[in-house]
Amino acid sequence: MREKTLAPDLDLLGCKEAAEYLGMSQGSFWQRWHRSQQGIGQHPLPKPYWHLSTGPIWTREQIDEWKAEEEAR
């Protein structure tokens, strides 16, 4: 398991930022996130890079990879 350290150049996205970045509503993103947590859905979101008290966060790279896979489906 890799060590999780935050670097100043690491591009992080919370749910709101990830939704905006993907061009979907926050509600749609949250619904997809909750379905992923329950193991429901055809293409679950990636496991968050980290969890903060405000919610999960992902790296932009994780979201980019997920988006590319989603578009290829």
Image (cartoon, rainbow, N blue to C red):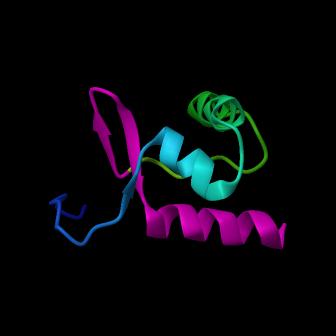
- Examine the rendered structure and indicate whether residue 25 appears above or below residue 64: above
Q: Which residues are magenta?
A: 49-73
Position of residue 57 measured from the top left corner of the image (x, y, whole percent): 38, 46
Instruction: Answer left or right for 42 relative to 57.
Output: right
Q: Residue at the spot x=60%, y=36% of the render?
A: 33
Instruction: Answer left or right for 34 relative to 1.
Output: right
> Seen from this angle, which residue lies furthest right?
73
Residue 62, magenta (yes or no): yes
Position of residue 12 measured from the top left corner of the image (x, y, whole percent): 36, 57
Q: Nearer the viewer, residue 18 or 72?
A: 18
Position of residue 34 measured from the top left corner of the image (x, y, whole percent): 61, 28
Instruction: Answer left or right for 61 relative to 50.
Output: right
Q: Toward which corner of the image does residue 29 lie, by quadrant? A: top right
Q: Residue at the spot x=49%, y=64% of the render?
A: 62
Q: Nearer the viewer, residue 72 or 18?
A: 18
Residue 38, magenta (yes or no): no
Quadrant of the image for the N terminus?
bottom left
Q: Residue at the spot x=17%, y=67% of the render?
A: 8
Q: Residue at the spot x=72%, y=34% of the render?
A: 28
Quadrant of the image for the C terminus?
bottom right
Position of residue 52 measured from the top left corner of the image (x, y, whole percent): 27, 34
Marks counted in the figure total: 0
- Examine the rendered structure and indicate whether residue 54 appears above or below residue 9: above
